[in-house]
Amino acid sequence: MTSPQLRLNLADGSVSFSFSPDAARELKGAIGQLMDHLKAAAAQSSSSGTKPTPQQPMEYYYTGEVFLEVFCNPNIWATPFAAKVLITLRDDRIRLNTEAELTRLVEDLQEFLDQHG
């Protein structure tokens, strides 16, 4: 039985790799916390006009047939809609480092969970 494939749509193409539904749910949870931090910082900044409290970056790691790292520093993005994540995907033959829109990653992850979750 083959593992389900998660397809991430990037600015200049896409990449697909084996990913488990459990790992997808973990990543979705980490992204949910990140979204909460981004929304809180945006609300704090707009309501008080002061600099928001610094938030911890999101770092997600998955090791399966490939190694996946997703990183986002919520302190540099004004809103969740502007935020981007850094993605590292590698195995023993190839390494991909790229940036993706957070909202696009959320959509790709939800599509994967709808199909395999």
Image (tube, rainbow, N blue to C red):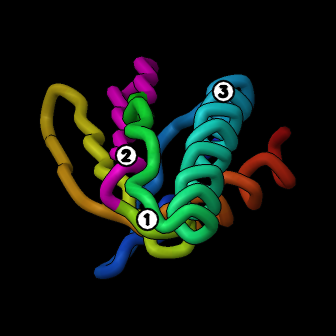
Q: Which residues are magenta?
A: 60-76
Q: Please give the residue where the numbered disc 2 appears in the rendered image.
A: 72
Number of marks drawn: 3
Residue denoted by label 1: 83
Quarter of the N terminus within the rendering: top right
Q: Nearer the viewer, mark 3 or mark 2?
A: 2
Q: Amino acid at mark 1?
A: Ala
13 horizontally vs 1: left or right: left
Point 63% across, 66% down: residue: 47
Q: Position of residue 52 (x, y in %)?
A: 45, 50
Q: Is residue 117 magenta?
A: no
Mark 3 and mark 2: Cα distance apart in space: 16 Å
Q: Is residue 35 left or right of residue 77?
A: right
In front here: 4 or 113? 113
Q: Which residue is mark 3?
A: 26
Q: CA distance from mark 3 to mark 1?
A: 20 Å
